Every structure is written in structure tokens, then in C-alpha cells.
Amino acid sequence: MTTQTQTRTIERRRLSIWLAIVGLGCAGAITGLIAQHLRQRLGADEAFMALGGSTAIWVSIGFLLARWTASARPTRDRVAWVSVAAAAYLFAWLIAYHMLLGHRDHLDFAQVWPQMRYWLVAVAPACLVLGYIATESLRKDLLGDICLALPLGWSLSEIYSSFRVGGSHIAVVSIPTLLVASLPLLALRRRPKWSLLVVVAVVLVVGVPFHLLYPHLSLDA
Amino acid sequence: MLALPPRLALFSAAAVIVAVSGTALVWDGPAAPSWSADGVVAEYRSEAGRLKLAPGWSWPKELVIDAGTREEPMHYGKGSGTEMAEHRWFCSWATRATSKTLSPSVRREALKRLSPIMRDRAFMFSRSFPEVIVTPVLRGDVEDKELRDFTSALCRTLQVAPDSERE
């Protein structure tokens, strides 16, 4: 490879990661707007309101996008770059969600900030976790299996809580959350049978304590 | 950042993330706008002029709001006056809707009065009124037990009553 070709390849890689970060930011903003729009559908659609204010499904979408970013990245500093992309998604989701809330209800920034700030604090550690597990979920070993199971683990509480409410909550919250969180498990198709046991164990080990600690986790809490 | 060396760009991006999360951790945000007692009264009157009460109810001619002292004046959050007026308006129609002495058609008509504003101003009502109340209102369910219990408890707590029961 000539020096000129190498330079072009490096520049293309740099551009691709920045495009991925901007893309995840845009995706986060769109999910935030959709979530707030659902959150404000009052009346007969309280299941949609619960979906809009929920966290698991939106974070799982972020995980899927981060995993896709990781698969398209070269290995150098991959976890760090994917974490930055995950942060772009999470910040955009939270800011868009709360800004639309403020806009539609004529609230000042001072009234929205107290609700939004603690979620923004959580982004710094959360993006590292999301970046790490999204990247490591590409591995075809025990660690990869564990990382693939984590979205279902953190979603288990919301799936179960909505299932207990029953009615439309099952169709609108439980099933979509279950489907999105299960999508990474498609990667297990060519893995040995015991991988499935690992997934079940991880889902229970993560999901049950998470449910006991945060049984009603919501963006409006 | 696009032109920066990769590591430097990465550290810059990390610094931005830490800065945003750190700011959220330590900064309480700008002071929320607040009203004096006069501001609350003005807000109340403005909202009262927009809302129609149920038959047998009227807006109080005098509104007593604690102004505090000259040294320590009271401050009220923006929207306090509006919320007070909306509580009275809610009590007027919800009391009518859950009354056991009126016909079901009259009660359903009363409940219909509540639904447009509760639908349009979702946030304020989700804060002032729990969802278990908003839902039967929007569904027009006058037999809902929680709506009746909530209306009774709220209006008793706020000492909001129709003209016939006021001293």
C-alpha cells in the first residue's frame, strides 16, 4: 500500500467514526422526540405513555446502534470510540425528550432542568458501560455471550412490570421491549448450546436485582 | 475535531462528555421564576377569566394569598395562581360529574367539560392530578370510584365548595 493510499484510508476511517457519532446523535434525538410524543398521549393510551416514559427499550436501541458502530470500526481504541458514540445517543435522547416536554407544556428551562440533570449525570458512566458491552458482545466467547444477554437483563424489570399491569401494556410495552432486547441474541445462532444457559443465567442475575432496586424506573420519576 | 489526531480527538470528546455530566451534577440550574402574592392573584384572575365554572359555583371576589413580610416576602412558583384556579374549576365540574343526586346524562356532560383542557395541558395535569384521575375523565367514566374519591378528598382539602355551601 502506498503512503497516499494509507493516508486516504486513515482519513476515511476518521470520517466514518465521526459520521457514526453524528448518526447516533440524530438517532437519539429522534427516539427522544418519539418517546416524549408517546408520553403525552393521555387517556385511553396509558400503555403508550408508559412506553414513552420507560428506559429499557430506548437504551436497548442505543445498544444495538452502538454494537453496529463497533462492528464497523477498526480495533484501535474501539471501546472508547463506541462509548463516545453511545454518549451522543444517550445525551441526544435525554435532551430531546425533555426539550419537547418543555416546549409542549410551556415550561422554562429552570423547570425542566431539575428533572433532566440526574439523567445527564448518569450518561458519563452509562456510555462507558454501553460502549464496552456493545463492543465485547462481538466476541464469540463467554464474555460475548454475557454482553449479548445484558440488554434482556436490564429490560426484564419493565417487561415483567408491564406484564403484571396486563391489557394493552403487554402488547405496547412488554412485547416490544422483549423483542428489541432479544435482537442481539440472534448472534447466538452459531454458538454452542451452553451459550443459551449463560444467557438465561445472566438475564436472571442482572434482571432480578435490577427489578428489586428500581421497580418503577421511569424518565418522569 | 475532525482534523485532530485520533487520540487527541478522543480525549476531547471524552472531555465534552465529562463536562456535560459534571455540569449536570454540580449545577442546580437557573432560579425558577417566582411570583409575589400579587403575581399569584393576577395569574389566578387571568386563568379564571378563561375557565367557566359549573352551575352553582362562582369565583371568589377576594383572594387571600399570604404575602409574607416586607423583610421576608413570600415567593410562589410560576403557575401557582393558574393551578389554584384550575383546582377550583376541576372541583366544580368533577363534583357535578360524581354527584349522586344528578342524572347520568347531566353528569356525563359535566365530565365532558373537563376533558379538553386535561388533554391539551397534559403536563400540568399529570403533575396536579394523578393519571388514575385523568384517564376516567378522558374516557367519560362518571362511575369511576377513584375519580369520586379523589374529587371528594381534593376539594375537601382545598376547602373548595359550591356557593350554596360557602359561609
Image: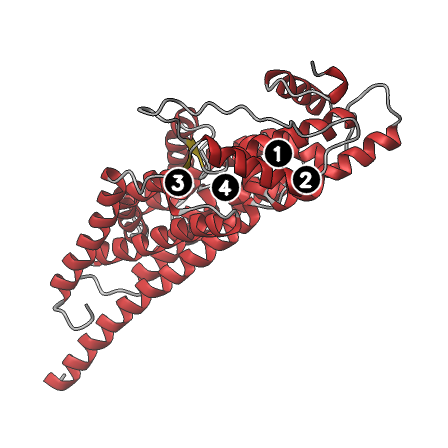
Which quadrant of the structure image shows residue B48? top right
Per the rendering, the mark at residue B33 is: 3
Instruction: Answer with left or right where residue A175 lies relative to residue A57.
Output: right
Question: Which residue type does callout 3 highlight?
Answer: Pro
Mark 4 element type: helix
Residue B73, position in %: x, y? 36, 27
Which numbered disc, 4 or 1, marks the residue closer to the eye?
1
Regarding residue A138, the answer to whether it shows in the image is: no
From mark 4 to mark 2, how far is it between C-alphas?
30 Å
Around disc 2, counting alpha carbons within 10 Å, would you say few (fewer than 14), some (14 to 19), or many (20 or more)?
some
Q: At 32% across and 44% down in the image, what residue appears?
A: A120
Which comes sooner in the sequence, label 3 or label 1? 3
Mark 1 or mark 2: whose residue is earlier in sequence: 2
- The image's mark for residue B51 is 2
Eye-nearest disc, 4 or 3: 3
What amino acid is at disc 4?
Gly
